[in-house]
Image (cartoon, rainbow, N blue to C red):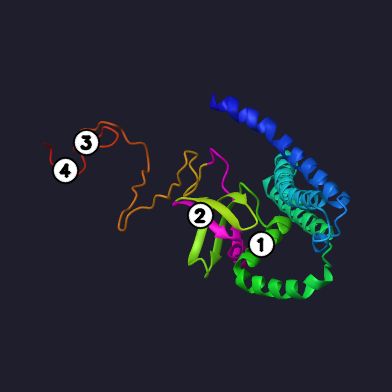
Amino acid sequence: MSEAVHKVRAKVRPWRSIFALVIAVAGAIAAEVSGVAGWSGLHGADDTAQITFIAGAVAFFVFGMAASVGLSGIVRSTSQALVGQAHAGVLRYVIVLAGVFTVATVSLALARIDVKQLLVGGAVTGVLLGIAAQQSLANLFAGLVLLFARPFRVGDSVRFRAGAISGIIEGNVTDISLTYVRLETADGRVLLPNSQALAAAVQLVVLPPTGATSSGGWNGGGAVTAPVTPASGWTTPVASGPVRDSQAPGSAPDGGAPAPGDAPT
């Protein structure tokens, strides 16, 4: 039952984003043809025009944002098999940012608000937000560098070495997002910030092929074997000739007479 519901929701989800986009466009058209010249012209318009303008502007903003987020998710799911999970995530964020910028610009145009009046306030707000979100922005830009430079990929076994991470972290890369690098280590899952991953020294660990055996190497069974060395003081006997399995005490090696000094038992 749950699988059937999941399949139905997966089929309906793209249509919801398309419907939201259609409603947003219809709201923008209704607000434009209402005859109200922005927010400043609401006082001189009749009640029908005011309701049409407000409903259309609000519908465009709300459903436009919803359509941007929904369509970005659809693009990510369809492009993940083509460009990979990491680049599909970057494409999703780009579509979200472009959609939000478009919706905000059109909303300001419908309200007849001059964008130039917001530049000074936007610059100050941007500086404050940049200072407050410095670490988050550092991870964001570091994630973009990792995604495009690709020093390692999903599935690689890597070893990070840096003072910021208190030594060495080794594991398999399972995901590279715009904020974190996900690793599966012997101690469990580790989320490494992109800024620290970019600043660390990265070593790609090459695993030997399955079934290869060597002294102190991979034994093919998931374990590493150490070479066996003789203990201190141990001497390995070296046979100068064939040794018989059974031999009477005191007898010669070839069945001859006993050696001098050997007492028979």
Query: CB atoms at circles 2 and 1 under 8 Å apart?
Result: no
The reply to whether the magenta stretch includes residue 82 is: no
| Cα gap from disc 2 to disc 1, whole angstroms | 18 Å
Marks 2 and 1, the one that precedes in the sequence: 1
146 lies above or below 162: above
Viewport quadrant of the N terminus: top right
* Residue 251 disc label: 3
| Cα gap from disc 2 to disc 4, whole angstroms | 72 Å
Marks 1 and 4, the one that precedes in the sequence: 1
Percent position of residue 22, x then y = 80, 41
Q: Report the span colored magenta.
A: 187-212
Query: CB atoms at circles 4 and 3 under 8 Å apart?
Result: no
| Cα gap from disc 4 to disc 3, whole angstroms | 9 Å
Q: Residue at x 80, y 46 (%)?
A: 27
Circle 3: residue type: Ser
Q: Image check: 29 left or right of 194?
A: right
Mark 1 or 4, which is nearer the eye?
1
* Residue 140 disc label: 1
* Residue 190 disc label: 2
Q: Residue at x 61, y 61 (%)?
A: 194
Circle 2: residue type: Val
204 lies above or below 164: above
Mark 2 or 1, which is nearer the eye?
1
* Residue 262 disc label: 4
Circle 4: residue type: Asp
